[in-house]
Image (cartoon, rainbow, N blue to C red):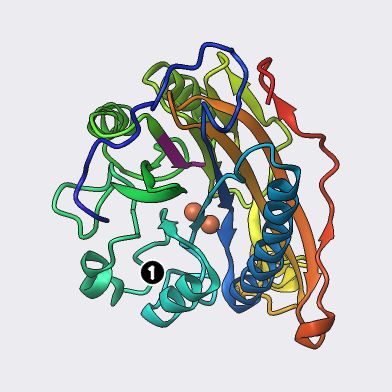
Amino acid sequence: MSPPRKSNQPDQPDQSGLLDPAVEPLVDILFLGDIVGRSGRRGVAHYLAHHRAERRAERRAERRAAHGSARPELVIANVENASHGFGLTEKGYHELCKAGVDVMTGGNHIWDRKEIVDWIDQKPNIVRPANFAEGSPGRGWLLVPVDLGGGRTVQVGVINLIGQVFMGQYNSPWEAMVDAIEAVRAETDLVFVDFHAEATAEKMAMGHYACRLGASAFTGTHTHVQTADQQVLMERMGYITDSGFCGPFNSVIGFVPDTSINRMKGTTPTRIEVSEEPLVQINGCRFTLAVNDGRCVGIERVQARLDISLPDDEITVESLADSPKTLCPVAV
Ligand SMILES: [Fe+2]
Ligand SMILES: [Fe+2]
């Protein structure tokens, strides 16, 4: 994004220990799991429109209550399956930008639409795994400015990595993460990691390592199944093993069930087909970060469902989240 600059130094020290927004500003990161196909893209657009309207109402209520400013939110989404289940077209990229996705992350399917190699370097808000082979197009991490209001801006570092267990031949994500976090932390304390991997143990080990390296928030992606283990590690870093996926609800991780069944039974050679069912699930995770030192002070799973076959003004978002907000032991 814009040239790196250090802008997150506190205006004044937090002596109270409480998160008074006037003393310790907060920023939310809304991460959306792998967006699958047209249903996923359209569902995300409707969900974000609904979500922004809700946040505007919250801001008005907070202003009326005069107890501090509402916090800004950065929307990050994994887009490796956004175009018909495989890769991302330039048209799909623009559609998601318009929907309100600020930063996009990738994974093993990011090159499936080969033409992306011609344009990824021109888009400042996409990252692909930092441990892809040296010389790969694109970038493995980036800095994005977030407006805190009152003339203040903070940068958030976004890092993408891919696992090695059951995933294929990639460079070491361990070494790549050390380098990427070090580079990001030279500029900002707010560090977000999307680790795209299959094995839960590899994700958890990488999560704990990221926490030790000073990351603020860490999510796994790739399995398309949300885990219920959101937590704040070491009172420092928000963690979830997998955020899940955004796309057709009645599907096998976004694909038509019968095509998945036939393929896995092995009775006939069958290509799996992305589902275009209009009942869409939204899976993600929201991290609330303290700007002054980058620690995560709140984490909440996002699970919602909406029917995009309805007229636009009749679409409602049904929240499926059954988890109360999980907080670290610091008042917020
Ligand atoms: Fe995926
Ligand atoms: Fe993947």
Q: Residue at x 81, y 46 (%)?
A: 321
Residue 286 lies in the magenta stretch:
no
Q: Residue at x 58, y 32 (%)?
A: 21
Secondary structure mainly formed by the magenta segment: strand
Please name whichever residue, 178 or 237, is drawn nearer the observer in this view of the structure: 237
Q: Is residue 175 above or below residue 17?
A: below
What segment is highlighted magenta in the picture? Answer: 191-198
Quadrant the N terminus occupies = bottom left
Q: Quadrant of residue 38?
A: bottom right
Disc 1: CA contacts within 10 A as few (<14), some (14-19) or many (>=20):
some
Location of residue 66 in the rendering, given as x and y in whole percent from the top left corner: 69, 41
Q: Residue furthest bottom?
A: 311
Please name whichever residue, 116 or 295, is drawn nearer the observer in this view of the structure: 295
Quadrant the C terminus occupies = top right
Quick check: 85 left or right of 148? right
Q: Is residue 242 visible?
A: no
Q: Residue at x 50, y 63 (%)?
A: 101
Instruction: Tell me which amino acid carries mark 1.
Output: Asp
Please name whichever residue, 22 or 99, is drawn nearer the observer in this view of the structure: 22
Quick check: 163 left or right of 200? left
Residue at the spot of label 1: 112
